[in-house]
Image (cartoon, helix red, strand yellow):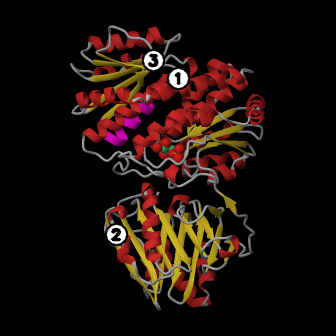
Amino acid sequence: MCGIFGYVGSRNDAGNVVVEGLKNLEYRGYDSWGVACSVGDGFLVKKDIGKISAVNGLQFFDHSCLAVAHTRWATHGGVTKANAHPHLSEDGSIAVVHNGIIENFVQIRDDLKAKGHTFLSETDSEVIPHLIEEEYKKSGDFAASVRQACLQFEGRYAILALHTGSKTIVAARTGSPLIVGVMRKDKGAAEDGYFIASDIPAFMNYTKVVQYLDDGEMVVTDGKSILFSDIQTGSEKPKREIEITWSIEQSEKGDFEHYMLKEIMDQKESVARAVNQDEEQIQTLAHAIRDAKGTFLVGCGTAAKACMAAEYFFSVIAKHHVNFAPASEFKLYHHFLQKESLLIVVSQSGETADVLDAMRVAKLKGSKVLAIVNVEGSTIAREADYTLLINAGPERAVASTKALTGQLAVLLLIAHALAGRLQEGRTLLLETGAQINDMLNPRYVHRLKLLAEKIKNEEDLYIIGKSWNYPMALESAIKIQEVSYVHAEGFAGGELKHGPIALIEKGSPCIALYGHDEVTTDLITNAIELKARGAFMIGVGPTQHEVFDEWIKVPDVAAAQPLVNIIPIQVLAYFLAVKRGKNPDMPRNLAKSVTVK
Ligand code: F6R
């Protein structure tokens, strides 16, 4: 949510570096953008509404060695040039880009107004440079004044700050991610420099050596050296340098028109990567679940649907009860947590604010946290007691696809381990991965494209499922809603007759997700009930039935059925978006990595 990126070093095209790098963070927000370059004794500031990808970086060739940039996902204040970052202090000597929300900004702004400050935007962020300026008047030390300002902020922030009087970037974080990219000649790099960004793809073209800022930390760098310190105490913090393992190619879309389609196709291999876990670690975690006094599964959006499916996996396969809650609701569950409880958090980005809050609730009770994440080194991965990586590779499209199947695979593997059948689970999942590879062939994809063409003008779409296909019905609705803006809703098949069936009219498109198991007959009965009210029935399952007007065949993979059933829906959602003229990679109002509450 909002991408920020700064560079200071021996290059003299800092403006280009940050503009081009920021294009790799556009998935974090894309309503407006801005750049500040240090030039001579001042800044060159450019900002505008629209997408950073439309900006030609070369126009920023400015002989600058230091620059910060921002791509915005609006929280406070509409999409206007004035609200775009960077924001400047009253005297224009300080520029700041910010990701997060300063919750006490009204109070700070009122205090500053009383001191004569004027504000040009409707954002919470604009108070940051103004407050730093006030602190600077007292100390004359820029880094110290950023620290003093941070001590007064409530809420979440990752900030990069520049001052005309100093050739450094000062950055600080609490609640929103910041990662340093290190380029040093003494480490074999061609040049010296430091990058500071919300996410690694911003600087992947330059370096794979990173240092993570933890919450409550700040850094000061002049491009030759860097100093990490604790915001509260001001004391220096040592930091390890870590080499990341994935490559820039993995995060590029290659010949695909959109990241979403590329990432759907990545599932040909990504499920097998998710299954490739250390067996001893999986067994240890299965034991931790068995011994815990209450296991809770939390996540948001798509990841939450993986958690819901896992409730069924644990129940059917391991006969073990676990509790699911959306992360944003988990706070209210704290009465049930004990020191011996276990919280399993599932998150692609590893940065979702609601998930981090749920973890903190559990930690306050002394409970242990297992994180299932995609992004190595993310805050959730680093703050958890145990971490399992799903190894899906970078997911750039806002709509989560390959991360979901990776999450489902890992959760299904753990359920098998808990039942003492880890090898059986591994074999099932590897076979499922191979089946997904076969499914995603051009003919299959074309068939779904034709189906999208057929229903593209419908404004309502309903999806039903039972058991572990029920959360997939909910996930199908999310996928279709977010990229195509079709009103889609998912239901448990048996719930229809308790209300939603009133929505069905002649021709209403309805999708039934099913497998070959104990609930198939009931689900087909629900499909027949819909058909009797005039629904246009689309079946997604391993066997044909006369109730379906269209049938999309999927392999019969027993408990792994959710992994294969969701694939045709992802493809359908993609083509619905494209055929309705929407960009599936940049859905309106959304951003990847939701780092605000
Ligand atoms: C939907 C989608 C979101 C995310 C949710 C959680 O396609 O991507 O619903 O699943 O915001 O994000 P992570 O998994 O990063 O915690």
Near-viewer residue (284 or 365): 284
Residue 324 image offset from top left, x and y in percent? 59, 33
- Which residue does the image show at 58% across and 77% down from the upper left? 170
Q: Give the number of the mark in front: 3 or 1.
A: 3
User: Is residue 250 found inside the magenta-colored segment of the image?
Assistant: no
Query: Which element carries disc 3, helix, strand or loop?
Result: loop
Using the numbered discs, state the Cα–Cα distance from disc 3 to disc 2 in whole angstroms. Answer: 49 Å
Q: Does 428 appear above or below 225?
A: above
Q: Does 385 appear above or below 559?
A: below
Closer to the chain start, of discs 3 and 1, is 1
- Is 383 situated left or right of 64 in this image? right
User: Is residue 484 found inside the magenta-colored segment of the image?
Assistant: yes
Closer to the chain start, of discs 1 and 2, is 2
- Total residue callouts: 3
Tell me which secondary structure the magenta stretch mostly adopts.
helix
Closer to the chain start, of discs 3 and 2, is 2
Q: Amino acid at mark 3?
A: Tyr
Near-viewer residue (493 or 236): 236
Query: Which element carries disc 1, helix, strand or loop?
Result: loop
Kindly identify which residue carries mark 3.
Answer: 514
Kindly identify which residue carries mark 1.
Answer: 468
Near-viewer residue (6 or 485): 6
The local crowd at label 3, few if under 14, some if 14 to 19, many if 20 or more residues have their Cα within 10 Å, is many
The residues colored magenta run 474-486
Using the numbered discs, state the Cα–Cα distance from disc 3 to disc 1 in whole angstroms. Answer: 9 Å
Kindly identify which residue carries mark 2.
Answer: 56
Q: Is residue 109 visible?
A: no
Q: Give the number of the mark in front: 1 or 2.
A: 2
Q: Amino acid at mark 2?
A: Asn
Q: Amino acid at mark 1?
A: Trp
